[in-house]
């Protein structure tokens, strides 16, 4: 007998085939996000359906499953592997809880259930029978469900469509054996006196109704995939359904519902046990406490995740247990009915042993050979249905044939042979010899048919109205079932009789269920039961007095009829009665119904029940990558920031990598952190830790350490009540401090800081030192576990070795005496240079200076204010970049400009940027020519009579030579001399160089005119000299100052040790080649001469500057020449130097200070010694701005010009900017800017300047005249800013970006739409236009629709170039309604807009948008703003047609061009505005009906007709003190928000804003009408809502302050998180088109919101991505505006 096509060759589930099935769960130990909209606990029928439907509704969904994920091929098929998959709970407890089979053993009832992703569907028999409809007539079911049966039937059909129950197409042997039983009962019923009325009535049915094939959730079709894209072969009949399907043919939940949930974005986690849930009352959320399994053991501390909606679907026992623990341990007030109403569904097992014929019920290996073995088929294939309309529903039952999985055969055989003599009953002794023969031949088991019966075990379905059911009770090991006499129901007795008749019909011995048998009474206190279909415990009811949940699955509050918002149960536990059939289809129907009603209650829209059109195309990630995890325990103390008290801290963190190869090979070797931490400073309970770890990242940034690597821990500590969040930052510095250091201390010691809130802008909680102790280190090493490896021990060992190799390699690099690092970024490499952090009105100006000996110098001016002017002069071998360094947090220029100085950086002839740097010159030339020419030029530019000087190193020597030589007479007001001056006491190395005349040797022997610090293209003599320099540098430096940077070595050789390495950050240290360059040998010879003499002298040693100088006081004071020259020192001088200067001894400045004071006792001379600083680190050190610069400014401030204040400077700059903006034509303006910058366009500070002339009309040559006119008209609007060039990506400017994967934005309330765009080659249809904030329909927007109409007509004329139009929010007005009138509905608004009568021009605007979308192939997107947030997709389509797409969120274009991806983001921006954000969440008290504060402000503005544009930014300027505009520091901002969150201040703030909006005082009793039904909100309720406090509580004070800045139009901090190349926003009327700092570096920010600027102009953003047809391949971003007066509108019309 064959079984069809699938029998021709069995499916062998090898590792290869196993990998054809996708892995749905996140990798074990993957971090669970902090919050989801929906969290589903459990993954069986109810959980899978809940996850599927919620994720299809575009909700963020998380599924938490206790068990493991099993894919086909993972299930046991031998008894040797089965026992490790068994968990016994209760008596004889064993197992961890991760096992596949769970046996819950109680005195009265034993429950068998499955545990894994997919729940019990993994091990059930796949039967999809419907319950008798009369079951739902019982009063135990809520009347709402009883009255909704038609819809409920459709819910069941929806479940049936997914699970696809169908009869098995073949007739198995055990099916035929059961058929014999059915025929026996049917044919002999009237002759059997002992059968009761149930038998007699039921067996009168036609045979086809009495016996039929069971519908099974089994695939029998031969298709590549099922309807969800999952590979699913047909059933091969191996008979292992109840131990797990290794072929994949079984329609378990992970093959359909869960797969669909995953496809729609659900996060699925396994090996997580939920302990309890708690309600967060004040924000309408739920906290779920869970523990992870690590190494098959539960972690000690619980972690948390929060959700708006929690759906318990952990099964009858699981969900009940969680709610009971939540009530007992979490204080959740749920019904006292919890745990009651348990039913075993009347399950009973009967066995007909040693029958006349083979039943073929024993399973085979899934790779069995069909030529040698007859497949048994699915476990259950047929049913005898003893239910009938003429029989009370409680008396009906069913009988199903059964089978035994291969892995269970051994215990099955043992039990049969042991039970037959004790519990067997054979009333036909005539076949005893035949049965004995079967036993002797070992065939008795093969001739045995198990029969599974289901009836009703609860009198709740009876006529007497009494309840007889079990109770689920919490126990130490989970739960137990208390139900004495559970098997005494009449249904069991009735089935027992049927089993006996079945055995008689089959010629076998009936074996009673041992635990139910009277023969088992000595061991049990009555007839007990075993069930595989547990039901109840969280029963449905009318109120909490008779149930735990209502008909929707919502949990009752206590014993009342009220329900908890957002808490549901959806599994077998809600079924209030036994069903009498396999319950999976009924449970699925109930879950589908609950989700349908939930979607309606939460306005999720219509549920989508469709299937994928092309499921074969789903690209599942089937081959997971090797990962690794380990557990690290850090312990130590945290010192409280305020009181300095000490608190113990302990964290137990799981370090996880899901892609081990990437972790090993890609810096910064990142891993995920997930775990718990305990510290009583923050919480009495353990905190959940979620974060990331960067391993061995090279230190960088302002505070980095030279030649070091770091392990950085970043994450959040979340309190269990979710009311507190802390930001945790820790790092281990891997740095060699002495020759014998091994690195153990560095790699096991972490220095941490903890802050309140989401980042380090919050209030600091404390600092601490944490250590990985030796026992914990051993534990961590032992815990290393490779995951997701399909191979065996060898593969895991290989990956483990690679991971440890990473540690050994990185430690060797740092601590080995033989390692040699690069130390520098090679000059040929391109790095990202940050722009100077200067006010917009401060631009670098380059002025050329021609000296009298015809050398061109440069002065770079930063006009930060009226102080000064200050000339800053560098030393030899460097350039002015030492003052404008971008690798420190704040450089000298930024510091001085911030303090309103007019700064000039002097690039004298020693600058390596100068063509004279390598030529022969002396400091005499500098003193005689360079300084006089530079000072005169500054005086000419500023109109001042004198200057202030800040001179450094050799620049200081040369300056004092010029000063003492009389070249600067009367032109210098005061001086700061850095490191040296006119007296020089050299360091030991400088003395050695001078003694041996090393510069002269370099010149004479090596023939070198100049020396540099580079490595490439060196001759052999240069390389020899390099080696000599390195050896010398190593000999000079103490160990702690050694490094591996070759440039550092050469600088040390040439000039001496110039810095203390501890003061340098790694970014600066690795780019020393950018600071140092070529140095003329002649100037080095001059410096050597000065060093030998001890004071400034001429190149030949001639006493030109201090003639008559002597160390002997009497001699020098007797010298007329000395006194004559020293009179030039009669100006205020600050002698400033590092106390650890190793180029010039600090005593040199001490002596100069004394000599100056000696010559001019009344003059102001100061001496500043900076502790722990060396030479140039006083200027370029990572903390120089706080440790050194203040001394410089103090010295300069005493003598700074004070004839102008800052406001005058700002006004002057503003006037200049306005004059520039009034220039006609774009080219004229750009030429003016370029003229100022043309002197030095190659300077690093000017790399951002766009010198392309993008207005070249040659691109229009192939167009028609009409097209040319349209294009020129549209593109010659006057821009607000210089259009920004969007540069094409090349190796040079994209190198850094390629290391970092794109991170799309996330949002709790907004959708994210990413569109991939590939333009056809040579297509001109590339321009993207965006407008926003037109507010069509608002009283402040009179005639604006006409103006938009004019713009769109221009756009239509040029549509051949237009790819897309983005209506970027607040296009249509829906907020501006007076407070005393009901606001219009969406339909009323639509009628107004479409009529064109009430709003002039609106109809034309709508028609233009339609025309662009329908006729010109322009992609049009309508993005919701705040004022039109009530718009819907249906409303947009009704207005504009089917081709305009509505997006409630963000739109991102990913543009592919020449192998690169360019991204531009469009969003309105209101959700980051304090007053207009919808992110605050629900309004649990119903105070303001879910609106944000901006809505009510707008309503008052419409009432009071606020005369200015009523955007909140302008209202705030009226409402808040001017101080707010000047707040620039985060800690001040956070403090301000905390103050404003106080009730008194918050009420005052809201009141002042409303007063301003209303143009008068607002009465707290005033009512704002909300609808036609009279619903209203008073001002008092608005103030009571405490809007600011709620924002601070949710987001932290720092982020709340950022949102306040966003209200004022400052989006800079938000833009820093953006990962796109261009971001286009609206919402504010601050004009913007500029480059900003983004997450990936530089981004272009444009704002199109200035329609709102009192409606005097219209504006738009135009974006063109880089493409080969653009000028030099670049793209372009510009914001344009056009004055639009009434007469222009009429003319256009």
Image (tube, rainbow, N blue to C red):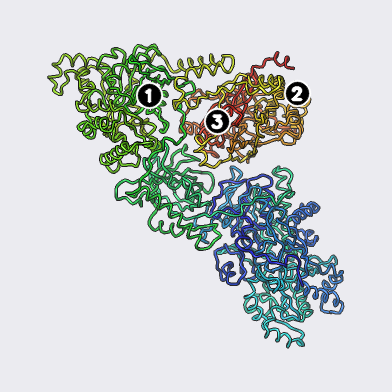
Residue to which mark 1 is pinned:
914
State the residue in front, 1272 or 380. 1272
Label 3, secondary structure: give it: loop
Query: Disc 1 or 3, which lies upstream in sequence?
Result: 1
Q: Is residue 619 above or below residue 527?
A: above
Residue 1173 lies, in percent from the top left, at 30, 34
The answer to which quarter of the image holds residue 474 is bottom right
**Would residue 1060 be visible to someone looking at this image?**
no
Query: Disc 2 or 1, which lies upstream in sequence?
Result: 1
Residue 1369 lies, in percent from the top left, at 65, 30
Q: Residues within 10 Å of mark 3 (few under 14, many from 20)?
A: some
- For the residues labelled 2 and 3, say whether their Cβ atoms are less than 8 Å apart: no
Residue to which mark 2 is pinned:
1404
Residue to which mark 3 is pinned:
1287
- For the residues labelled 2 and 1, say whether their Cβ atoms are less than 8 Å apart: no
Residue 1086 lies, in percent from the top left, at 25, 25
Q: Is residue 200 above or below residue 307?
A: below
Q: Nearer the viewer, mark 1 or mark 3?
A: 1
Q: Is residue 671 left or right of residue 1437?
A: left
Q: Residues within 10 Å of mark 2 (few under 14, many from 20)?
A: many
Label 2, secondary structure: give it: helix
Q: Residue at x 56, y 64 (%)?
A: 477
Q: Residues within 10 Å of mark 1 (few under 14, many from 20)?
A: some
């Amino acid at each position: 007998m064959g079984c069809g096509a699938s029998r021709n060759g069995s499916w062998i589930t090898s590792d290869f085939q196993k990998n054809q099935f996708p892995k749905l769960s996140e990798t074990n130990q993957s971090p669970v996000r902090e919050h989801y909209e929906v969290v589903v606990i459990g993954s069986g029928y109810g959980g899978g359906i809940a996850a599927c439907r919620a994720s299809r509704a575009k909700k963020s969904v998380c599924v938490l499953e206790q068990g493991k994920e099993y894919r086909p091929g993972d299930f046991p098929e031998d008894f040797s592997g089965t026992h490790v998959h068994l968990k016994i709970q209760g008596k004889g407890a064993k197992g961890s809880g991760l096992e596949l089979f769970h046996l819950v053993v109680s005195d009265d009832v034993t429950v068998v259930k499955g545990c894994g992703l997919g729940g019990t569907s993994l091990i059930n028999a796949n039967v999809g029978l419907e319950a008798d409809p009369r079951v739902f007539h019982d009063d135990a079911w809520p009347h709402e469900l009883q009255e909704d049966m038609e819809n409920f039937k459709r819910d069941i059909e929806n479940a049936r469509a997914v699970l696809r129950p169908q009869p098995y197409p073949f007739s198995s042997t055990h099916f035929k054996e059961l058929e014999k039983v059915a025929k026996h009962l049917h044919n002999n019923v009237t002759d059997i006196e002992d059968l009761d009325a149930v038998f007699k009535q039921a067996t009168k049915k036609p045979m086809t109704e009495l016996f039929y094939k069971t519908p099974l959730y089994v695939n029998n079709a031969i298709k590549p995939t099922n309807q969800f894209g999952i590979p699913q072969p047909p059933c091969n009949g191996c008979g292992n359904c109840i131990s797990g399907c290794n072929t994949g043919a079984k329609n378990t939940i992970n093959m359909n519902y869960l797969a669909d949930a995953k496809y729609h974005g659900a996060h699925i986690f396994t090996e997580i046990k939920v302990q309890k849930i708690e309600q967060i009352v004040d924000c309408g959320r739920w906290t779920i406490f869970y523990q992870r399994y690590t190494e098959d053991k539960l972690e000690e501390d619980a972690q948390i995740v929060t959700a708006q909606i929690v759906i318990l679907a952990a099964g009858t026992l699981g969900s009940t247990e969680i709610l009971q623990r939540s009530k007992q341990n979490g204080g959740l007030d749920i019904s006292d009915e919890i745990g009651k109403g348990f039913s075993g569904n009347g399950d009973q097992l009967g066995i007909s042993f040693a029958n006349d014929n083979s039943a073929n019920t024993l399973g085979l290996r899934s790779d069995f050979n069909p030529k040698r073995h007859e497949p048994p088929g699915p476990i259950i294939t047929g049913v005898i249905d003893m239910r009938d309309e003429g029989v009370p529903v409680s008396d009906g039952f069913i009988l199903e044939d059964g089978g035994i999985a291969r892995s269970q055969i051994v215990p099955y055989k043992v039990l049969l042979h042991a039970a037959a003599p004790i519990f067997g009953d054979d009333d036909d002794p005539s076949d005893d010899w035949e049965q004995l023969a079967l036993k002797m031949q070992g065939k008795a088991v093969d001739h045995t048919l198990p029969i599974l019966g289901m009836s009703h075990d609860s009198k709740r379905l009876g006529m007497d109205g009494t309840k007889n059911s079990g109770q689920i009770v919490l126990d130490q090991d989970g739960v137990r079932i208390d139900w004495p006499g559970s098997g005494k129901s009449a249904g069991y007795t009735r089935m027992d009789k049927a089993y006996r008749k079945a055995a008689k019909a089959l010629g076998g011995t009936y074996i009673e269920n041992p635990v139910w048998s009277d023969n088992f009474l000595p061991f049990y206190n009555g007839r007990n039961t075993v069930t595989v279909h547990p039901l109840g415990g969280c029963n449905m009811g009318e109120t909490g007095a008779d149930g735990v949940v209502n008909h929707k699955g919502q949990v009752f509050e206590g014993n009342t009829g009220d329900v908890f918002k957002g808490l549901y149960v959806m599994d077998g536990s809600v079924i209030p009665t036994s069903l009498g059939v396999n319950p999976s289809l009924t449970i699925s129907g109930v879950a589908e119904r609950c989700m349908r009603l939930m979607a309606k209650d939460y306005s999720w829209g219509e549920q989508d029940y469709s299937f994928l059109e092309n499921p074969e195309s789903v690209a599942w990630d089937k081959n997971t990558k090797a990962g690794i995890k380990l557990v690290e325990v850090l312990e130590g103390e945290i010192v409280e920031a305020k009181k300095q008290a000490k608190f113990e801290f302990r964290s137990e963190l799981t370090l996880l990598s899901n892609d081990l190869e990437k972790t090993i090979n890609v810096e910064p070797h990142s891993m995920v952190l997930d775990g718990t931490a305990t510290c009583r400073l923050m919480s009495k309970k353990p905190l959940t830790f979620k974060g990331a770890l960067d391993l061995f990242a090279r230190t960088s940034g302002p505070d980095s350490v030279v030649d070091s690597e770091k392990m950085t821990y970043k994450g959040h500590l979340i309190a269990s009540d979710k009311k507190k969040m802390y930001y945790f930052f820790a790092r281990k510095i891997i740095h060699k401090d002495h020759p014998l250091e091994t690195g153990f201390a560095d790699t096991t010691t972490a220095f941490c800081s903890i802050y309140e809130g989401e980042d380090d802008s919050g209030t600091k909680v404390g600092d601490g030192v944490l250590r990985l102790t030796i026992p914990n280190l051993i534990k961590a090493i032992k815990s290393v576990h490779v995951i997701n490896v399909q191979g065996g021990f060898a593969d895991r060992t290989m990956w483990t070795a690679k991971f440890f190799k990473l540690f050994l390699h990185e430690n060797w690099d740092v601590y080995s005496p033989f390692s040699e690092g690069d130390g520098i970024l090679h000059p040929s490499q391109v790095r990202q240079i940050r722009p100077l952090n200067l006010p917009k009105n401060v631009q670098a100006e380059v002025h050329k200076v021609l000296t009298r000996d015809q050398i061109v110098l440069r002065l770079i001016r930063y006009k930060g204010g009226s102080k000064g002017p200050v000339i800053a002069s560098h030393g030899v071998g460097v350039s002015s970049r030492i003052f404008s360094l971008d690798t420190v947090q704040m450089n000298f220029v930024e510091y001085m400009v911030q303090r309103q100085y007019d700064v000039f950086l002097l690039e004298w002839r020693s600058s390596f940027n100068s063509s004279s740097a390598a030529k022969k010159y002396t400091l005499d030339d500098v003193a005689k020519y360079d300084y006089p020419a530079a000072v005169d030029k500054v005086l000419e530019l500023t109109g001042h009579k004198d200057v202030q000087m800040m001179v450094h190193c050799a620049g200081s020597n040369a300056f004092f030579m010029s000063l003492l030589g009389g070249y600067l007479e009367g032109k210098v007001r005061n001086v700061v001399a850095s490191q040296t001056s006119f007296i020089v006491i050299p360091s030991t190395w400088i003395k050695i160089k001078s003694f041996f005349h090393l510069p002269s040797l370099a010149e004479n022997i090596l023939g070198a005119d100049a020396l540099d610090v580079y490595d490439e293209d060196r001759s052999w003599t240069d390389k020899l000299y390099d080696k000599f320099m390195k050896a010398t540098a190593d000999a000079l430096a103490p160990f702690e100052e050694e490094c591996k940077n070759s440039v550092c070595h050469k600088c040390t050789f040439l000039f001496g040790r110039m810095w203390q390495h501890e003061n340098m950050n790694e970014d600066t240290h690795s780019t020393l080649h950018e600071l140092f360059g070529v140095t003329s040998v002649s100037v080095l010879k001059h410096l050597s001469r000065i060093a030998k003499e001890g004071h400034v002298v001429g190149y030949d040693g001639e006493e030109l500057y201090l003639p008559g100088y002597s160390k002997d006081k009497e001699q020098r004071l007797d010298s007329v020449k000395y006194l004559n020259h020293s009179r030039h020192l009669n100006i205020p001088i600050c002698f400033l130097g590092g106390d650890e200067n190793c180029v010039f001894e600090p005593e040199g400045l001490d002596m100069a200070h004394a000599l100056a004071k000696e010559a001019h006792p009344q003059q102001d001379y100061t001496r500043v010694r900076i502790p722990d600083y060396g030479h140039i680190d006083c200027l370029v050190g990572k903390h120089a701005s706080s440790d050194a610069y203040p001394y410089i400014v103090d010295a300069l401030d005493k003598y700074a010009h004070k004839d102008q204040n800052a406001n005058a400077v700002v006004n002057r700059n503003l006037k200049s900017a306005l004059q520039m903006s009034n220039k006609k034509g774009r080219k004229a303006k750009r030429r003016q800017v370029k003229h100022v910058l043309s002197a030095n366009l190659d300077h690093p500070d000017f790399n951002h300047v766009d010198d392309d002339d993008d207005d070249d009309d040659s691109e229009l040559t192939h167009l028609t005249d009409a097209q040319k006119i349209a294009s020129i008209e549209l593109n010659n609007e006057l821009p607000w800013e210089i259009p920004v060039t969007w540069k094409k990506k090349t190796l040079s400017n994209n190198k850094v970006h390629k290391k970092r994967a794109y991170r799309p934005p996330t949002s709790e309330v907004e959708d994210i739409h990413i569109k991939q765009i590939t333009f056809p080659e040579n297509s001109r249809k590339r321009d993207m236009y965006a407008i926003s904030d037109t507010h069509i329909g608002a009283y402040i927007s009179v005639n604006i629709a006409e103006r938009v109409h004019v713009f769109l007509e221009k756009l239509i004329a040029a549509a051949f170039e237009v790819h897309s139009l983005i209506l970027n929010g607040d296009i249509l007005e829906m907020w501006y309604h007076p407070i005393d009138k009901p606001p219009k509905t969406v339909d009323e608004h639509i009628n107004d807009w479409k009529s064109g009568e009430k709003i002039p021009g609106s109809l034309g605007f709508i028609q233009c948008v339609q025309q662009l979308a329908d006729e010109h192939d322009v992609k049009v997107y309508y993005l919701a703003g705040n004022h039109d947030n009530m718009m819907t997709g249906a409303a947009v389509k009704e207005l504009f047609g089917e081709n305009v797409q509505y997006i409630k969120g963000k739109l991102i274009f990913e543009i592919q061009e020449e192998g690169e991806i360019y991204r531009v983001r469009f969003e309105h921006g209101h959700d980051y505005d304090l007053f207009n954000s919808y992110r605050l969440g629900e309004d649990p008290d119903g105070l303001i009906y879910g609106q944000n504060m901006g809505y009510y402000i707008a309503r008052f503005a419409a009432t009071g007709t606020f005369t200015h544009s009523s955007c909140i930014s302008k209202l705030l300027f009226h409402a808040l003190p001017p101080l707010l505009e000047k707040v620039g520091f985060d800690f001040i901002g956070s403090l301000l928000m905390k103050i404003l969150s106080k009730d008194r201040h918050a009420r005052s703030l809201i009141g002042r804003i409303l007063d301003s909006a209303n143009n008068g005082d607002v009465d707290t009793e005033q009512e704002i009408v909300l609808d036609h039904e009279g619903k209203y909100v008073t001002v008092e309720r608005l103030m009571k809502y405490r809007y600011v406090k709620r924002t601070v509580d949710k987001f932290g004070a720092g982020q709340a302050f950022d949102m306040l800045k966003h209200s004022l139009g400052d989006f800079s901090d938000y833009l820093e998180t953006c990962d796109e190349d261009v971001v286009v926003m609206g919402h504010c009327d601050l004009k913007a088109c500029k480059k900003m700092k983004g997450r990936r570096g530089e981004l272009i920010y444009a704002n199109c919101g200035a329609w709102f600027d009192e409606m005097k102009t219209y504006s738009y953003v135009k974006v063109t991505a880089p493409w080969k047809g653009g000028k030099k391949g670049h793209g372009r971003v510009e914001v344009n505006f056009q004055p639009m007066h009434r007469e222009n509108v009429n003319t256009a019309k």
